[in-house]
Amino acid sequence: MRNLHFIIVAIALIVCSCGGDVIPKPQGFLSLEYPAPIYEKIASACDYSFEKNNLGTVRFKDDCSAVIDYPKLDASLFITYRKVTGNIETLLRDAQKLTYEHVRKADNIAEEKYINDQQNAYGMFYDVLGNAASQSQFYVTDSTNHFLTGSIYFNVKPNYDSIYPAAVYLKNDIRRLMETVEWEE
């Protein structure tokens, strides 16, 4: 009899503990805030200059390339400089090829043309959506002497949902760099 009471109480507890509908958690996003960018002009020892966010630190290399490190965002913008010596078609093809190597992992690659006749700067900004290794790439050139390409990389496994706020922040920095590039003659 005692076992029967125990079994009845156990069954009652199990039945009573199951209740209510399962409610899924609401979809959430990271609430990451970054400081308003403050831009400063950076001149290379080579034939170009641009404005960069003071959140990043720039390192120029001997071949006129540069790396802008963003330690707070755990990201780096790699910039390559090439002289145009009758090879503009090859430089353009290589820049586009580099971007479209990410197509296997990307959900979409949006192209934005850039034209600034006053600065004699023309190019393309690529917004890479999805879990690709690089979320943004660009090239800018005067088409006769100078060619600049760049790619942003985060120092983490690509997970677009997680790095989205930082990627958007850095896309704005890249656009600013493109808009402020100046060629030395």
Image (tube, rainbow, N blue to C red):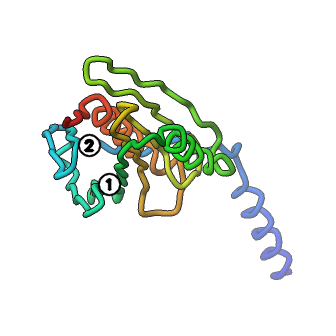
Figure check: 175 above or below 159: above
> Among all residues in the image, which is located at the extreme front?
86
**In the figure, is residue 24 to the left or right of 76?**
right
Instruction: Work out which quarter of the rendered image holds the C terminus and state it.
Output: top left
**In the figure, is residue 143 to the left or right of 40?**
right
Q: Nearer the viewer, residue 95 or 40?
A: 95
**In the figure, is residue 55 to the left or right of 123?**
left
Q: Which residue is mark 2?
A: 34
Residue at the (22%, 44%) spot, across then down: 47
Residue at the (49%, 44%) spot, across then down: 91
**In the figure, is residue 80 to the left or right of 57?**
right
**x and y percent of residue 109 in the render?**
59, 36
> Which numbered circle lies on residue 73?
1
Name the secondary structure under disc 1: loop
> Among all residues in the image, which is located at the extreme bottom?
2
Name the secondary structure under disc 2: loop
Q: Amino acid at mark 1?
A: Leu
Choose the circle earlier in sequence order: 2 or 1.
2
Cβ–Cβ below 8 Å for labels 2 and 1?
yes
**x and y percent of residue 92 in the render?**
51, 39
- How far apart marks 2 and 1 lie (CA) works out to 9 Å
The quadrant in which residue 155 appears is bottom left
Q: Nearer the viewer, residue 82 or 61?
A: 82
